[in-house]
Amino acid sequence: MSILNRKKKDEQNAAPADEAKENAPSVEEKASAVNEEVKQAPKKETKGRGRLDPLIKSIQPRVREFRVSMKLLSKSFLAMLGLIIVITMVIIALLAPLLAPPPPEWRDTSIVPKYFNQGISPPGSTYFDPVHNRTVDFILGSGEDGSDIYYGVIWGAQTSIRLALVVVLSAVVMGIIVGAVAGYYGGKIDELMMRVTDVFLSIPGLVLAMAVIAVLKPTIDNIMISLVIVWWPSYARLIRGQVMTIKENTYVEAARAIGAKKNRILFRHIIPNAISPMLVSATMDIGSIVLTTAGLSYIGFGPPGVAEWGRMANEGAGYIVGFISYQGVSYNPYWIIFFPGMMIFLFVMGFNLLGDGLRDILDPRLRR
Amino acid sequence: MRLTSFIIKRLLLLIPVLLGVSLLVFVLMGFTGERWTAYTTTDHPKQAQIWAIEEKYHLNESIAVQYYYWLDGIVHGDWGYSKQARMPVTDAISNKFPVTFELALISSLIAVIIGISIGTLSAIKRNKPVDHVVRFVALIGVSLPIFWLALLLLQALYLNLGLAPSGGRISLEFDPSNPLATTPLIVRTNFYTVDSLLMGNLQIFGDVLWHLMLPAICLSFATIALLTRIMRSSMLEVMNLDYVKTARAKGLSEKVVLKKHARRNALIPTTTVVGLAFAGLLGGAVITENIFSLNGLGKWSTAALLSNDQAAILGFTMLIAIIVVLANLIVDIMYAYLDPRVRLE
């Protein structure tokens, strides 16, 4: 009800269309603009005419859209579950120094601490470190060379989120540049660029990433580079298709008719409208990127020692069908692969659920 | 007539793509080490041998000339020597390809049967509990790390229950490479399923299938999830179309409407996904083959990459690219054949 009312009100004092289009914000601005709008909200009532007014008016529909989307999202149980998992992962990543404090002498927090004398031990075991005169608790057990699984599981969230965000953002930016140029200008540029993406797409992602890492060294940064190389072509394709559809729209024609320059049309009118479908695939790709990274590190392309879930699981692979002996009791060391694997699964699941939910609410046929 | 010209056109379009792939791989490999390593058969060749190789393969000339002669070798079947497999790359490929192909084929079969049936079921029972369960399980399927699933299955079925083998393609008593084997398999095609049937020995055939079971299940898991989702969405789309309504209106039974009218047409987009997924499985068997110690392309390529075996990396990447590109072409042709509305441009 309230949404409908607001909609009517907005329609009444909507800014002239031209003005609104001229000020259509770029995506980067959109997020901050949303905040601004919230701050500015009370002013609307007092009819204050600031310099920001045209901007506020132009983003009002977007804000309304955002609110409707959030409302729809909150109705879907699975999407909310995904959102909760994602938020939990972010919190784990941010609070990693509190949840799993590194030893005081530890310099690089992304490396999992090892206690060589401990070896593999089951969850709940403890170890007295004679060098630093303190007791270490292995809440989730220890892996090869006494590496702390709990520490790796917690700090792995940070590694994964950082890696996935960097890869997705870089791939999206590269995809937008290539795809928009190809789709907008068409002709020979388009043909050339699409053949280049064909080349990249005809090698399976895992194989291409493996080859790139084999050339570079297996570090987190190089894994990121290899994954950007794998992922950008699909975004370029997606954006190209979007741009080709959007450039036929009347409002683009209108902009051209009033004499807007080509670049302005592309960056102000076409790209902002082509981006929303990428939101869904970017969300789901965060999951797939973490999954691919885990696969890569599992088969031996992982950064040595780093808190990365796939690499940690790799440590346990050799023991999974055998037994180890700890303090005279024999154990099957499932914990070395179980906990890191569980984290990968939850992480990917969270982003997939959220992406699925986003797709449903962004699909105009399914909403309202 | 139009189909042939379409195929010819598409085949011609493959040339720049394959050239691009080869250039990409060639440049990448240039960073990993000296190019002559792709042609030596010994680990530590003498300087004179290296010079001879460089002379023979024109490696002491400019990069463009090197690329030309390398490409010439590829076309004429000289793909270099894989130190990892201890044989020429072409031999290694023909030796290992059947292993991966067999695995990919069986897992796609599993995926197609299960994926299409539960995808259809889920669409028919839309928004009923069955649908929710199927969708949720499909989501789990695409989110599970393959290696994790494989290791947990190994632990449960091999270690705890003893129902599955720990890995490999065949039990020791039938293994052709085991000199003590009681009834060794006679290898003709290196497709062990085919070879065991050619021998007429059903016991060995069962043993081979038993060894394929776990890897195939693991490999098919993600594909099942993918196919279920595609099948469900295309079925839902088709079920709202007019001709399905017409079929219902003229009084056909629900079974006939769903089977003959809806599902047949919903299968069209699914077919394309199956084709691409199969090509993906050939390249994606990397993790599964490593875990179940199957000596296929995936395991070979991993070992090659980790030990910087240039010729093998080049060969493997080229081969996979050719397969994917051809799969794309076949899928396009099939699509045009299945759906007459698609115009061949």
Image: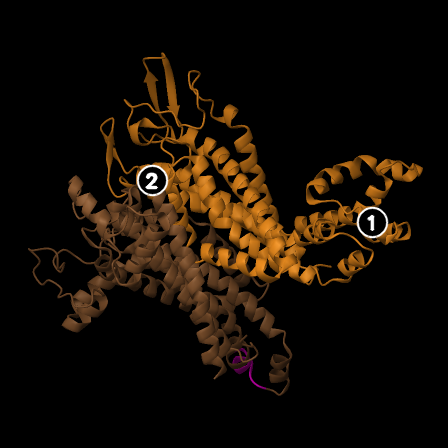
Chain colours: A orange, B brown
Which chain letter matches label 1?
A
Q: Could you say which quadrant of the image residue A332 lies in? A: top left
Disc 1 element: helix
Q: Residue A314, which numbered label?
A: 2
Q: Badge 1: few (under 14), some or many (20 or more) residues near its Cα, within 10 Å?
A: some
Three-letter code for the amino acid on which mark 2 is drawn: Asn
On the picture, is B143 further left or further right than A354?
left
Quadrant location, the C terminus of chain A = bottom right
Relative height, residue B147 to residue A130 (above, below)? below
User: Going 27% across and 61% down the picture, which residue do you hit?
Assistant: B97
Please name which of the two marks, 2 or 1, marks the residue nearer to the observer: 1
Position of residue B28 measured from the top left corner of the image (x, y, whole percent): 38, 46
Disc 2 element: helix
Q: Is residue B257 magenta?
A: yes
Seen from the viewer's position, the closer of residues A181 and A36 is: A181
Secondary structure mostly seen in magenta is helix
User: Going 38% across and 20% down the picture, which residue do you hit?
Assistant: A136
Seen from the viewer's position, the closer of residues A205 and A352 is: A205
Q: Is residue A236 magenta?
A: no
Q: Which residue is mark 1?
A: A20
Three-letter code for the amino acid on which mark 1 is drawn: Ala
Position of residue A10 measured from the top left corner of the image (x, y, whole percent): 86, 50
Q: Badge 2: few (under 14), some or many (20 or more) residues near its Cα, within 10 Å?
A: many
Residues shaded magenta: B252-258
Residue A262 appears in the figure: yes
